[in-house]
Amino acid sequence: MSDIDRRAFLSTVVAGVAATGVSLPLRGVGVDDPSQPSRLAPASPAFRPLPLADIRPDGWLARQLKIQADGLSGHLDEFWPDIKDSQWFGGAAEGWERAPYWLDGVIPLAWLLDDRPLKARITKYVNYIVDHQRADGWYGPYPADAVAKRYDMWAILLVNKVLAQYHGATGDQRALDAVVKSLHAMLDGLDQTPLYGWGKFRWFEGLVPALYAYEQTRHSWLLDLARKLRAQGTDYEALFETDDVKVPTPRRGLWKWTKHVVNMAMAPKAAALSWRLDRRTADRAFATKMIGVLDRYHGQVTGMFTGDECLSGRNPVQGTELCAVVEFMYSLEQLFSVFGDPVFADRLERVAFNALPAAISPDMWAHQYDQQVNQVQCTVNPDHGWSTNGPESNLFGLEPNYGCCTSNMHQGWPKFAGHLWMKTPDDGLVAAAWAPCRVRTSVRGTPVAIRVSTDYPFREEITLGVSPDRSVRFPLLLRVPAWAEGATMRIGDAPEMRMTPGTLHRLERLWTGETNVRVRFPMRAQVTVRYNDAIAVERGPLIYALQIGEAWTRVNADKPHRDLPHADFEVRPTTPWNYGLIVDDRHPGASLRFEERSVGGRPFSPDGAGVVAKGRGQQIPGWKIVRGWAGELATADAGTADPIKPVSDQPIEELTLIPYGCTNIRITEFPRLKPTVSGP
Ligand SMILES: [Zn+2]
């Protein structure tokens, strides 16, 4: 045990914490001393996610995860060569990011569902990776002279994150030992071959397993490794001082590492992980700044930003890559966990309930590479306007454009489910995000069960049933979304209490027997002004989009591995889509009528929409498909500051809007039409 190791170990003992992976900040340690880089133990996160074993999806979320396991996620390893025959599993196909990506999503999926056959297959794959780690710490697919050959470190950062997650799910010591051995090889390897390429731009992903392994082992060199990764990696703070990140990449423009949408979606977590290393207050501010710049110059109403696949501006016909969606969700989960600011969890819900399901078919067998907020057809389109992506990027299929999303999309829902509830530092619980689930965990030494019964985000009401095995006092923190003005809570039959939007409402009491806590988050319709003065309809965490009749046509049937149900499809509109929306934007609630429906077996499908909105609009004949996409809104006279006049020779029609995540094709940003008194 080195001197530094011993100090860390002793301080753990002094703090009264058994070496079980629970870390506490060391008292009396103020600022970091750069001459003693590892003296400071990492700061604890504001909240710690519960172990996967403590949480189970329920209601619509359980159905969604089951659909996922029955779809591509649970079957990809049976037929797709880059997983089935991956070099990571002893085959001869791809040996880089794809198998680790897939494991990163199916591990939480299988353990949350307790899907035994899937768990058994995953265990077999993980065992293969661990068994074939070389004595020098490098994994099987890496060449024997990995460092001398300048092998991009990205896949090692990724697979160690995966194995750390597997250790968290199973407690398998061999997985943790493999991570420690691999990271130690990296510590030396980085001196010979510094980070470059993907590893350089994604250095912070290595901090996830490094900090995890540190908390398990207290090896202080893991903190040296974390700092070395940061020192060699891309400095996003400096990058976001440049103007280039603000400029949309032109149609068929230059592909750049520094504008790559997935890098941009992953990088906000760097601030959180870096803050844990040395508590630099600027890191907190930078996470907010970075997301703010992305929003301002590339933001979409879904909570995402465009990148097809380099940052593409605010036009709602530009694409957002699915990898960016799931990676941004994971970044937001990390940011909320570390900083405890509910703004990150609000944002997480917005992406999870809108952008994530939209890019994946309702049966979760097909996905898009790029989704568009205004997406009126998805076709093989050589005349496309993506910045750097190819003609098939918005098809629903097995591997449209490129297979990264095929292997990486699986983490979206399971990690969201796994981050719904977290532990507070004073051994209470916090509801980070809202969805139906059951929690069974230990609080202050007492087993506690919490059942969250709700059809949120399709409903305003959430009921929590809190049942400790015996009476126990602990705080329960309930996240109140920033949009939920007038939010209320009632414990049992006690009087209703107000909750403040944008806060974590703290409820500390002696919990005895079963207590029902009923929460209501009033959802008011809002109309927001977007690109070219178009308008979008939001209500609570959901965005609403025009429901369009759709025709699916199978394509690429002659390509390998496109047998049903994992085939490729084009989608075309069968009903008009070129509507302007008649909305009084000062009183949008009065122009839109929301109707609740039962949430379908497929919650995110046009037929399964749990809530629909009825509004009024008029067709705009000049607004047409140009180059295979919805034409520029400006061609529909929407580019003016004043509401455009009703298109007088067109009838006013009733329009049906459904949650964005339920649509496959859609109009979301509408030309704004002036309210009239006539019409239905
Ligand atoms: Zn991708």
Image (tube, rainbow, N blue to C red):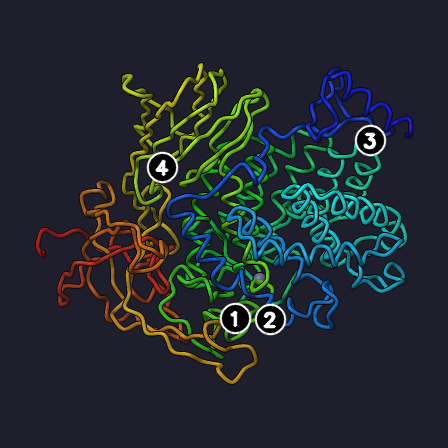
Mark-to-mark CA distance, 1 and 2: 9 Å
Q: Quadrant of the N terminus?
A: top right
Q: Which residue position is annotated with label 4?
A: 453
Secondary structure found at label 4: strand
Q: Could you classify mark 3 by the number of other residues whose Cα lies within 10 Å: few (under 14), some (14-19), or many (20 or more)?
A: many
Give the label, 1 or 3, closer to the camera.
1
**Residues marked 1 and 4 touching at CB (< 8 Å):** no
**Residues marked 1 and 3 touching at CB (< 8 Å):** no
Disc 1 marks which amino acid?
A: Leu
In the rendered image, residue 131, in percent from the top left (x then y), is placed at 79, 56
Residue at x 65% of width, y 43% of height: 170
Mark-to-mark CA distance, 4 and 3: 45 Å
Q: Could you classify mark 4 by the number of other residues whose Cα lies within 10 Å: few (under 14), some (14-19), or many (20 or more)?
A: some
Mark-to-mark CA distance, 1 and 4: 34 Å
Q: Which residue position is annotated with label 1?
A: 398
Residue at x 31% of width, y 22% of height: 490
Mark-to-mark CA distance, 2 and 4: 37 Å
**Residues marked 3 and 2 touching at CB (< 8 Å):** no
Give the label, 4 or 3, closer to the camera.
4
Mark found first going from the N terminus, 3 or 2 = 3
Q: Which residue position is annotated with label 3?
A: 38
* Camera-nearest residue between 638 and 440: 440
Mark found first going from the N terminus, 1 or 3 = 3
111 to 224, vertically: above or below: below
Q: Is mark 3 within 8 Å of ligand 1?
A: no
Q: Which residue position is annotated with label 2?
A: 80
**Residues marked 1 and 2 touching at CB (< 8 Å):** yes
